Each structure stands twice: as C-alpha cells, then as structure tokens.
Image (tube, grey):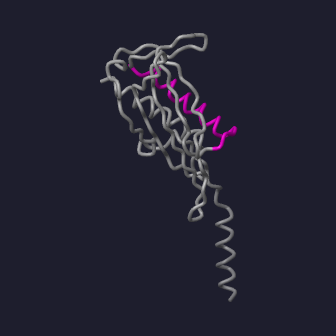
C-alpha cells in the first residue's frame, strides 16, 4: 500500500514538473503542412501579358462569420500573397494604394472558418476561394481554392492563413511557366 502511494507521489511529481506544451508557429512546420492550392488558368493569353494587380481583401463567405477574426485571417492571406509575389518572378507588379487603375484584381472569399471539437482536439477548418480577373471587363483569368485543417493546440490560425497566402502566390507564380 505504502509502495503504491510512493509510486503515485513520484508519478504526480514528475508529471507536474514537465514543461507546458509549446505552441509552434505555422511557418516552422515542414513543407508537408503547407496548404495545397488547386485551381485553373482560364485565360492564358491575358495572364501571360501580365500587368499591375490590385490585391483585394478576402471577404467572409456563407460559412464564415463576418468578424475581427476573419478580417485578421484575410489580412494575413493578403500579406502572404503580397510578400511572396514581390519575391517571385511573375508577369505581375503589385498595385500601390494610390494607383487608381490596375490591370487585374485579385479577389477572394473565406468560404469556411469553423472551429470544432473532435476527439478532444481543438480544430478549425479554413478554406478560401479566389480569382484574378481583368479589372475593365471582370473576365476571370485564374481561379484558385485552398483549405487547411488547423490544430488549435499547436498552430496559430493567423500563421496558417499567412502560409496559405504564400502557397496561393506560389500557385500564381507556377502558372507563368
């Protein structure tokens, strides 16, 4: 009996002294955790011509609440796209805020951002749809979709949104070949 109590005491002592679980930023994960982007090039001639592109915010879609959290996710998506497109060799230049007439518009929707508890793990699902279109006619030249499951215990949703933006920019850049 005393032996069992001693064993339990040592177990709780060791368990209680273990460090708390550390949250790992999304950008420190391996390339396997980078969100996958799919899509299609609808008008290759207009895309290859290139020009100035304005980056619009990702608006909340039907399955995403319009709140500060989705606004922050949208900003991180745009930040990832912008920073990566500035580094990539594409046919596009990013429109500055004061530029009134860009050639193209990138617009999108956060189609779903939902948090769910499953099997005692906190998870969230983030999915976006977007397009690049001609500003003058509205014709769509590139369509894309991306989604990710976020483990809220280990990943920051804003970091995942940024990585999703990076992946979208890489997808855009991959269409120039």
**Would you say 73 lies left or right of 174 here?**
right
Main secondary-structure element of the magenta-colored stretch: helix
**Would you say 87 lies left or right of 158 here?**
left
**Would you say 54 lies left or right of 143 here?**
right
Q: Please state, as top left, top right, bottom left or bottom right, where the N terminus lies in the image.
A: bottom right
Camera-side residue of 30 and 146: 146
Task: Give the residue drawn at x 53%, y 23%.
Answer: 55
Q: Position of residue 163 (x, y in %)?
A: 50, 36
Residue 75 forms part of the magenta stretch: yes
Residue 121 forms part of the magenta stretch: no
Task: Give the residue drawn at x 47%, y 25%.
Answer: 84
Camera-side residue of 118 and 133: 133
Q: Please state, as top left, top right, bottom left or bottom right, where the C terminus lies in the image.
A: top left
Camera-side residue of 85 and 10: 85
- Which residue is outermost to the left? 177
Please identify the quarter of the rendering in which residue 96 is found.
top right
Q: Is residue 152 above or below residue 105?
A: below
What is the span of residues highlighted in magenta in the rendered image? 65-89
Q: Is residue 16 above or below residue 75?
A: below
Q: Position of residue 31 (x, y in %)?
A: 42, 41
Camera-side residue of 43 and 55: 43
Please identify the quarter of the rendering in which residue 157 is found.
top right
């Amino acid at each position: 009996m005393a032996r069992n109590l001693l064993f339990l005491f040592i177990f709780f002592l060791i368990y209680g002294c273990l460090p708390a679980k550390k949250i790992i930023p999304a950008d420190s994960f391996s390339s396997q955790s980078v969100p996958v982007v799919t899509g299609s090039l609808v008008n290759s001639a207009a895309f290859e011509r290139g020009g100035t592109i304005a980056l619009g915010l990702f608006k909340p879609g039907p399955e995403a609440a319009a709140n500060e959290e989705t606004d922050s996710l949208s900003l991180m998506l745009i930040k990832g796209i912008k920073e990566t497109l500035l580094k990539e060799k594409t046919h596009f230049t990013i429109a500055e805020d004061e530029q009134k007439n860009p050639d193209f518009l990138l617009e999108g929707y956060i189609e779903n951002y939902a948090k769910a508890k499953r099997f005692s793990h906190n998870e969230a699902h983030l999915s976006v749809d977007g397009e690049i279109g001609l500003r003058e006619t509205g014709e769509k030249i590139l369509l894309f979709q991306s989604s990710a499951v976020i483990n809220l215990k280990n990943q920051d949703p804003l970091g995942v949104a940024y990585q999703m933006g990076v992946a979208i920019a890489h997808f855009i850049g991959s269409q120039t070949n």
